[in-house]
């Protein structure tokens, strides 16, 4: 094996997986049709990688929803409430919930915008290997072999799986999922023996948890697990892949002391891995997969830097294999599908298919002459001197006293305790999407399009008034995506037509490409917000996406610090906020769902990151009067780790995901003495179920244990874009009724 990748997009060139999955959920396709689509997409990937000349081809990277959920099914870590179901019904119930059974919790996969389904492990969990078609790694290995492709099955490593898990509700105090490691390793041992019997020569075990801070006990558990697995008499060779940063020296030393044959190191996000490897004396009897091609960003590989990193490894390992820094599932599929990108931007890019070619080319160079003259540097980014001059003139950004703002806003807005609102978006119907597509294609004029969007905004405003919501939104019918919509209107960004990336389940996004200095040539949202406000006496929120999230959910230039780029985006948003305020918008929401997502995986980097992330938000929002209420929104992250930073943002109101995580945030708020308004989501919008009034009431009563009524807001946990109107109306009616009952009490 001279070249390999750690994973590949599974969505299909035309998003076939999304279409097939949603058809299945809607009852338009049966299990057999969905399974057939999955098999076809897997076969396409394996043959594509083989024909590209890649030596090591991964399998078991396909999933109908999420690879961590697949692992839970594989090892039978299925909570009791789902066991009355079977097959795909059980699988999707764990991911999405059904009317009578809530879904498992969902959160971000390390510092990416990919979401995984959190395993729920209790002391009575008994791991066992799934049989038959549920044993995915075996099934897919045999599928590939039948096509003449010998693959390397990929598994979520046992340590990472348990470190990502949470104790099941009702688990005794002090119980940790890691306590069950030995039983889980026994199941992995059985699986490895079966894969060996099927002919697998290598198996990849992903352990990205090793690039985060790990305790001595966790390092000991790592050694115990891999001593057991590598000591099996009948097994494939083992590649333990780490990615998203630098592995710790203690973890690497322990791993090197086991019998595993290969170690994967991310040399893009973790350039310090070279120093760590040298500090432990190298791994002279092992293969190192050098992650020199970036699996998280879309820029062409710097061939000179990649070759130098591989050359440095040659004296530290028995064999060096050229690879990707992580799975390519985090980048779009194929640049060839993009025909309208600016050529000066396009020539700097490589998507998943092109990155495979880069890996193959680098592998050939490494095995011939490492000193081959490197390619010239990629074209440089555009510079806007006016933007840079304005930023140089701005100092630290601060707003007025919190207590003063609270009093002024309470008098100006006249809102009740437990004010009700939504996060921003309303369901995007087929008619809305068709109108946007027709306008983009030139089939309808701008005037006709504006009229259609205004009709939808008027309908949404009337709908919210009828429901009895206190603070309204315009529904965002004109927006394709909360990041892409703004990127298409800002200088310095480029948008793709087919650059889809999976965020979770069937939710795909097209991350914009931030390639040059950022500037706002004209207002972006003012006409829609002011039109909505003209239709009602109730306050309508202006809706923007914050600077950190604009970066986190884009592919960002890598030639300057993220902090500098964040300030440029913040300056553009500051101008937009000023225009909204001047137009009479009294509440402006600047969403930052990715604030926790970008937190460095090691605690040593937290302070510096949070300092510039908070500063960027405050730069964007600090230019308004005390009477203008600033909101922000965050979702699907572990907020307890950044609760002080959430306070430092100094938003007047923060709405957060809390329903799936069982209102865990309430305890964090109580401990931190959080002083501003808070809206913990009282129901999960990523599930089709409609909670009862009593369930939402209970969530509100939990929140009131930490937040006084005048500062507690009532809202769903995220936007409603992906939901249908019947369930949206039922859920919001229930939410308003729950707020009314608790308000009266």
Image (cartoon, rainbow, N blue to C red):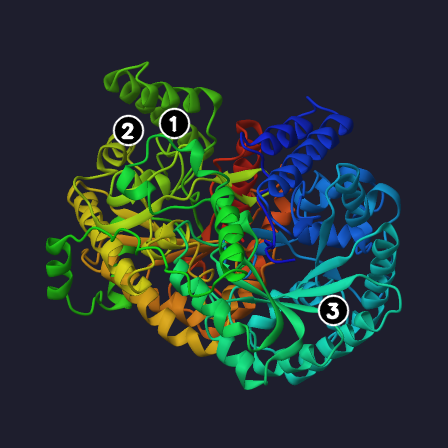
Task: Classify 10 Å Cα crowding around label 1: few (below 14), some (14-19), many (20 and above).
Answer: some
Q: Are marks 1 and 3 in contact (CB under 8 Å)?
A: no
The residue at the point 28 percent across, 35 percent down is 537
Q: Secondary structure at mark 3?
A: helix
The residue at the point 27 percent across, 51 percent down is 379
Residue 177 is tagged as 3
> In the image, is 127 to the left or to the right of 110?
right
Above or below, 106 against 433 in this view is below
State the image coordinates of residue 617 (x, y, percent, origin top left).
30, 60
Q: Earlier in the sequence, mark 2 or mark 1?
A: 1
Residue 535 is tagged as 2
Q: Which residue is mark 1?
A: 462
Task: Classify 10 Å Cα crowding around label 3: few (below 14), some (14-19), many (20 and above).
Answer: many
Q: Are marks 2 and 1 in contact (CB under 8 Å)?
A: yes
C-alpha span from label 2 to label 1: 8 Å
Q: Are marks 3 and 2 in contact (CB under 8 Å)?
A: no
Which corner quadrant holds the N terminus?
bottom right
Q: Earlier in the sequence, mark 3 or mark 2?
A: 3
> In the image, is 331 to the left or to the right of 250?
left
């Amino acid at each position: 094996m001279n070249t390999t990748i750690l994973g590949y997009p599974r969505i299909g060139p035309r998003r076939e997986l999304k279409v097939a999955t949603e058809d299945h959920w809607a009852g338009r396709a049966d299990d057999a049709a969905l399974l057939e689509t999955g098999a076809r997409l897997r076969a396409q990937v394996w043959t594509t990688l083989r024909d590209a000349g890649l030596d090591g081809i991964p399998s078991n990277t396909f999933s109908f929803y999420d690879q961590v959920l697949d692992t839970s099914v594989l090892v039978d870590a299925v909570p009791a409430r789902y066991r009355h179901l079977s097959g795909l019904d059980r699988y999707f119930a764990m991911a999405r919930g059904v009317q009578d059974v809530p879904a498992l919790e969902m959160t971000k996969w390390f510092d990416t915008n990919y979401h995984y389904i959190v395993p729920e492990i209790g002391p009575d969990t008994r791991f066992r290997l799934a049989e038959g078609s549920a044993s995915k790694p075996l099934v897919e290995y045999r599928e590939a072999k039948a096509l003449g492709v010998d693959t390397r099955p990929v598994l979520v490593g046992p340590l990472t799986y348990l470190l990502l898990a949470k104790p099941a509700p009702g688990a005794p105090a002090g119980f940790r999922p890691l306590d069950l490691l030995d039983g889980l390793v026994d199941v992995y041992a059985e699986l490895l023996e079966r894969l060996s019997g099927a002919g697998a020569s290598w198996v990849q075990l992903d352990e990205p948890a090793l690039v985060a801070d790990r305790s001595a006990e966790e390092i000991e558990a790592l050694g115990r697990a891999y001593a057991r697995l590598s000591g099996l008499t009948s097994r494939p060779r083992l590649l333990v892949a780490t990615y998203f940063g630098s592995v710790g020296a203690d973890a690497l030393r322990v791993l090197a002391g086991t019998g595993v044959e290969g170690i994967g190191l991310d040399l893009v996000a973790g350039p310090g891995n070279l120093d760590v490897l040298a500090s432990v004396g190298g791994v002279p009897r092992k293969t190192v997969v050098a992650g020199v091609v970036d699996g998280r960003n879309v820029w062409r590989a710097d061939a000179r830097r990649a070759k130098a990193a591989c050359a440095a490894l040659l004296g530290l390992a028995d064999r060096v294999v050229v690879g990707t820094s992580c799975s390519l599932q985090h980048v779009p599929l194929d640049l060839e599908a993009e025909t309208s990108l600016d050529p000066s931007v396009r020539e700097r890019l490589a998507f998943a298919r092109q990155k495979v070619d880069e890996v193959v080319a680098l592998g050939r160079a490494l095995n011939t002459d490492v000193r081959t003259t490197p390619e010239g540097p990629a074209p440089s980014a555009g510079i806007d001197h006016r933007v840079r001059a304005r930023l140089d003139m701005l100092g630290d950004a601060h707003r007025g006293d919190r207590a003063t703002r609270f009093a002024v806003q309470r008098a100006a807005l006249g809102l009740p305790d437990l004010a009700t609102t939504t996060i921003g978006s309303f369901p995007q119907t087929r008619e809305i999407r068709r109108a946007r597509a027709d306008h983009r294609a030139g089939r309808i004029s701008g005037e006709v399009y504006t009229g259609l969007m205004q009709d939808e905004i008027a309908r949404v405003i009337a709908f919210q008034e009828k429901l009895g919501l206190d603070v309204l939104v315009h529904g965002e019918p004109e927006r394709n995506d909360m990041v892409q919509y703004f990127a298409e209107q800002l200088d310095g960004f480029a948008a793709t037509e087919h650059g889809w990336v999976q965020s979770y389940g069937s939710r795909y996004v097209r991350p914009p490409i931030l390639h040059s200095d950022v500037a706002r040539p004209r207002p972006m949202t003012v006409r829609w917000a002011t039109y909505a406000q003209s239709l009602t006496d109730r306050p309508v929120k202006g809706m923007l996406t914050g600077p950190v999230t604009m970066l986190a959910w884009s592919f960002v230039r890598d030639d300057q610090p993220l902090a500098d780029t964040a300030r440029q985006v913040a300056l553009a948003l500051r101008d937009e906020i000023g225009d909204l305020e001047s137009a009479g918008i009294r509440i402006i929401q600047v969403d930052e769902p990715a604030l926790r997502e970008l937190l460095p995986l090691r605690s040593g980097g937290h302070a510096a990151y949070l300092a510039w992330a908070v500063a960027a938000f405050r730069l964007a929002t600090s230019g308004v009067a005390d009477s203008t209420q600033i909101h922000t929104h965050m979702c699907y992250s572990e907020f307890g780790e950044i609760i002080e930073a959430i306070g430092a943002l100094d938003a007047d109101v923060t709405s957060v995901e809390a329903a799936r995580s069982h209102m865990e945030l309430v305890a964090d708020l109580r401990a931190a003495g959080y002083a501003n308004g808070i809206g913990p989501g009282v129901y999960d919008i990523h599930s089709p179920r409609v909670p009862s009034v009593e369930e939402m009431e209970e969530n509100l009563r939990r929140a009131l244990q930490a937040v006084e009524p005048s500062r507690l807001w009532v809202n769903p946990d995220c936007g409603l874009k992906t939901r249908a109107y019947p369930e949206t109306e039922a859920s919001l009616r229930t939410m308003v009724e729950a707020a009314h009952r608790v308000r009266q009490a």
